[in-house]
Image (cartoon, grey):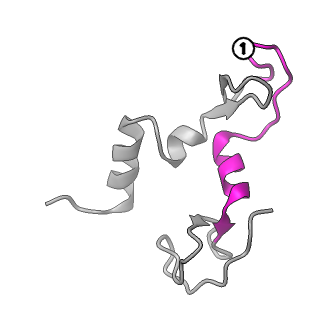
Amino acid sequence: MIRDNKSEKFMRLGTYGMGPVAMKKIKICPRCGQIAKRTSLLCPACKRLLTRKTLFDEYKMMHSRCPSCDIPLTSDTQYCPHCGRKVALIPGK
């Protein structure tokens, strides 16, 4: 039986290059879609100046978030799966 604790779940996502840890390490160029390291200032392909936002930052802006712990939530969430608080969804800013 697989235990569903948070760190194991994130580790499993990380083995496939997904999840919040992986998303915090990369940026996506808005012009050409090339992946760049979080610390990159310029796109490695088209040399466009990159914003400071990582892929995770962009993802958080596109989704509703828990007002308590700022975790992205689905549109039908009533309780935050991270902190357990009842949520009144606030849209991404």
Q: Residue at x 47, y 41 (%)?
A: 18
Q: Position of residue 8 (x, y in %)?
A: 32, 52
Considering every residue shown, the one lying at the far right of the view is: 49
Residue range (magenta)? 40-65
Q: Could you tell me the amino acid type at mark 1?
A: Pro
Is residue 6 toward the left or the right of residue 22 in the image? left
Q: Residue at x 35, y 54 (%)?
A: 9
Asked if residue 42 is among those painted magenta in the image, a careful observer would answer yes
Circle 1 Cα neighbour tier, 10 Å, few/some/many (<14 / 14–19 / ≥20): some
Is residue 29 toward the left or the right of residue 7 in the image? right
Q: Residue at x 40, y 50 (%)?
A: 10
Residue 91 position by quadrant:
bottom right
Asked if residue 62 is among those painted magenta in the image, a careful observer would answer yes
Total labels drawn? 1
Is residue 93 toward the left or the right of residue 82 in the image? right
- Predominant SS along the magenta part: loop
Q: Position of residue 92 (x, y in %)?
A: 75, 64
Q: Position of residue 4 (x, y in %)?
A: 29, 63
Q: Nearer the viewer, residue 24 or 73?
A: 73
Q: Position of residue 56 (x, y in %)?
A: 64, 47
Q: Nearer the viewer, residue 83 or 57?
A: 57
Residue 90 position by quadrant:
bottom right
> Height in image: 5 above or below 24?
below
Q: Quadrant of the N terminus?
A: bottom left
> Height in image: 54 above or below 68?
above
- The residue pinned by badge 1 equals 44
